Amino acid sequence: MHTATKTSGLSSGSRLWIGRIGTFVVVMIALLLVLFPIYWMVVTSLKLPRDIYRTPSLWPHAFTGANYQVLLQQKGFLLNIGNSLIVSLTVTVIAVIIASFAAYSMVRFRYRFRGLFGRVILFAYLTPTSLLFIPLSVVMAQLHLANSLFGLMLVYLTFALPLSTWLLQGYFRSVPRELEEQGMIDGLSRMGALLRIVLPLSAPGLAAVAIFTFTGAWNELLLALVLITDPAQRTAPLALNYLITSDVLPWGPLMAGAVLSSVPLMILYFVAQRFMVQGMTAGSVKG
Amino acid sequence: MPARPKSIPRGSPRLATFAYLLVLPAVVLLLGLVGYPFFYAIYISFTDAVVGNPGHWIGFGNFAYLAQNPSFLNSIVNTVTLVIATDGLKLLIGLGLALLVNRKFVGRGLVRSFLMLPWAMPAFVVFLTWRLLYLPIGGGLSLALQGLGLNFGIIDWLGQRQTAMPSVIVATVWRGFPFWFISLLAALQAIPNELYEAARVDGANAWQRFWAVTFPSIRTVIIVTALLSSIWTANSFENVWLLTQGGPSDATMVFPVLAFFGMQTQRIGEAAAVSVATLPVLAILVILATSLMHRDED
C-alpha cells in the first residue's frame, strides 16, 4: 500500500482508511459502469416487445424466452452460429498448426532471413483489415472463392496466422532447451522433440493462443460483410448486422443473438483468465 | 530465462532445410494473403478500377479527388479525434484502475476478472448493445440517468451532431480500456517492491514515488500499448458502422467506413485510395511498434 504516507496532518491510520474507502468507491463505480451494458443486453433479450419500446424500465416487468424463439426459429440463427463455428474452428486449427511450426523454427534455429521472417510476421499482424479488405475481395472473386465459407477461412488466416505465430514464439522461448536435448539423446527426432516435448510443455500457451485465434475469427465482421452475400453462408455477426437494416430494429431478437454469441466467450475468458492475461500481456492481442 | 537459439552449424544442411521447411508454410501464406493484397491495394489506388474492370493507371487522380472531398476530409479529422480522445481516456482509466487494483484488497482477483469483461465481448456485440443503450426513447442510458435523478429529456445521442462523436468515443473506450488496464497492471506487478522501499527511505512522497519509480518502469508498456491501440482504433470498423454508419451527415465518418461505402459503389480504385492515403501515418506507427516489439536474440 504505497500511497499512504505520513506527510499530512492526518494520522497514518486514518489516511489508510480514507485510501481504502476511496479505492472501494472508485472500484464499485467502475464495476457498475462495466456491468450495466452487459446487464442491459441480457435483460433486453428477455423482455417482451412492449417492455422494450412502450413502457421501458430499468427492471423488466416480465421475463420471456420469445426473443430467442424468434431468433432461432424464424431467423434461423442456428445456421449462422453453425457457420461461425465451422469457420472459426477450422481457422484456429490450421493457424495453430502452421504457427507452431513457424514459431518453433524461429525460436530454436538461427538461419538467414530469420530476422526478416520475424518482422514480416509482426508487420502482417499490424496490417489492418481496413487496408486489406478491398484487394482481398478482388482476389477472392478472381479465385471464385467469394461467397464461400472456404474463402472466408482463407482470408481469416491474414490475422489468425501472424497473431498465433507471434504469441507462440513467446511461449516456446520459455521451454528449456535442455529438455529437448535430453529427449533427442533418448532417441527422439527433431520433429519428435517438437511434438512430444515442446508442444505438451506449452499446452497452456497453446490453449490461450487457440482461444485468441478463435475469438478473432468469431468476432470478424468487415471481411464477412464484403465477401459473403448468400444468406445461407452468413456468420453470426453478419446475420445480426443484417437485422439492423430495417427501420424499426428488432431489439429483442438482436440482443438474444448478442447474448448467444458473447456469453459463452465471456465465461471462457472468465474461467481461463490466468492464461489469457499471460498471453495478452506477452503478445499484446488485438481486441 | 529464454534459451538462446543455437545457430545451425555449418555442414548440417539437413537441419537448415528442416528449419526452413517449418517456417515455409507460414511465410508463403502471409506473402500471398497479406503481402500481395497490400501492394495490390496500393496499385489499384492509382487506377480507376471498378468491380469487374481493372481500369487504367491514373496517377494521383484518386488522391487529388479525395483531397477536395468533404467526406474524406471529415473522416480524417474524425479518425484523429477518435484516436486521441479514446486513447487518452483509455490511458487515464486503465492506469487509474491498474494502480487501484495493484493494491491488496479482498476480492481483487474477482474485480480484475469483471473489469476485463468488455474486452472479452465481441466488438459487434458491444456496439450493438451500445446502440440500444443510446436509444432516445427506452434506451438504457437515458433510463439510468433518470434513475440517478438527471433528467435531460429525450436526447437522440447518436442522431445529433454534438452528441454523436462523444457517444462513439464513450462506447469505444468502454470496449477498449481493459486492454490498457491489463497491460498496465501486469507492468505494475513486475516492479520490485524494493524500489518503493528505497524511495520511501529517501523520503519520497507518493507523488514523487510515482514519477521516480512507477512511471519509468511502465513507460515502454505505455508506449507500446498506445501505438497498438492507436493502430487498432484508427482502423476499427465495427464501432462507427454499427452505431452511426458515419452519420449524422458525416459527423462520425471515419476512413474505414468511408472505404467500405466506396467499395459498395463499385469504384474500388477510389475506395482503396481512402485507406492508402492513411498509409504514411500508419506505416510510421507500425514501424515504431515493430521496433519496440521485435525480439531477436542475436
Image (cartoon, coloured by chain):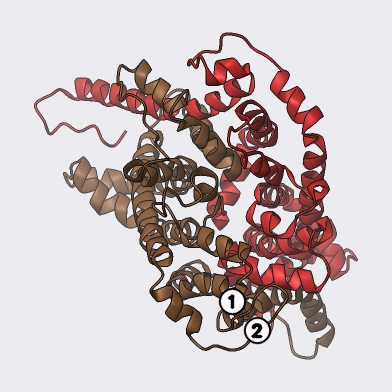
Q: Up-down: is A255 above or below B90?
A: above
Q: Quadrant of the N terminus of chain A?
A: top left
Query: Can residue B1 be seen by looking at this rendering?
Result: no
| Image chain in brown | B
Q: Residues within 10 Å of mark 2 (few under 14, many from 20)?
A: some
Residue B35, horizontal then vertical, whole percent: 65, 77
Count the labels in the image: 2
Residue located beneath label 2 in the image: B55
Q: Up-down: is A159 above or below B205?
A: below
Tell me the distance, in whole angstroms, between the alpha carbons under discs 2 and 1: 8 Å
Q: Chain of mark 1?
A: B
Looking at marks 2 and 1 on the same chain, the residue that comes earlier in the sequence is marked by 2
| Image chain in red | A
In the depicted view, which residue is nearer to us: B292 or A156? A156
Image mark for residue B269: 1
Residue A131, by quadrant, is bottom right
